Amino acid sequence: MERGSVAGMGKVYEQIDDRIREFLMAQRVFFVATAPSDPDGHVNLSPKGLTDSFAVLSPHQVAYYEYGGSGIETMAHLRDNNRIVLMVCAFDGPPKIYRLHGHGESVLAEDPRAAELIKQFPAPPHVGLRSIVVIDVTRVSDSCGYGVPLMSYEGDRDLLVQFWDHKTPEQREHYRATRNAHSIDGAPVFAER
């Protein structure tokens, strides 16, 4: 579609231009949605934050730091079918929402490619980085954010950083092996295909 062409109420863009990039980089939180191929599987929606954890790599590619946590659905779904969408809302300023649809890959923190990707972020990751999710963006669209509330940013929570900072490398690996090895639908995440 043409830059700014109408698709429903919003517009579809050919790429992430400088204006869209500036908007994306200014937001403090974004949301990631994925789903397994199995229609009986659970759809996943995750909020993401932490300052400097998002990067626009090119007009058709973005990435974000993905830290270990209570689940591993995004990585499981990307391994299954690589479909993903990011939604970024303005909680201050003019009302706007952008959605970035595409195909993603989780590049594990220990993968040699991760070091090169990290150089493209505004800052290095915190302790606990599990992977870098790289998304080849196939559709960029916007919509109004008229229903999104106005909220003020007070700061990042440091609880996730503290959680991983207090664990030894062995404890981090144990957590991954026992708590993050399978999705809630039972799909293995780290096993070879």
Image (spheres, helix red, strand yellow):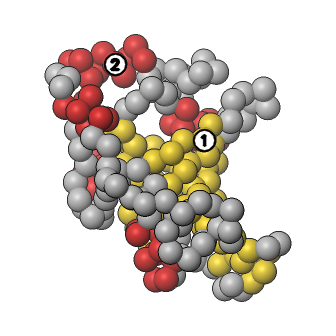
Position of 113 relative to 23 (above/below): above
- Could you say where residue 151 lies in the image, as x and y percent from the top left? 49, 59
Which residue does the image show at 23% across and 44% down from the upper left? 126
Q: Which residue has dot 1 on it?
A: 45
- Could you say where residue 68 lies in the image, as x and y percent from the top left? 37, 32
Quadrant for residue 144, please give it.
bottom right
Q: CA distance from mark 2 to mark 1?
A: 22 Å
- Could you say where residue 139 lies in the image, as x and y percent from the top left? 65, 67
The answer to whether residue 186 is left or right of residue 62 is: right
Please say whether residue 79 is visible from this viewpoint. no
Position of 122 relative to 15 (above/below): above
The answer to whether residue 115 is left or right of residue 154 is: left
Q: Amino acid at mark 1?
A: Leu
Classify 10 Å Cα crowding around label 2: few (below 14), some (14-19), many (20 and above): some
Which residue does the image show at 36% across and 38% down from the upper left? 67
Query: Can you tell which mark lies on residue 175?
Result: 2
Nearer the observer, 133 or 26: 26
User: Could you say whether the residue bearing mark 1 is in a helix, strand or loop?
Assistant: strand
Nearer the observer, 178 or 114: 178
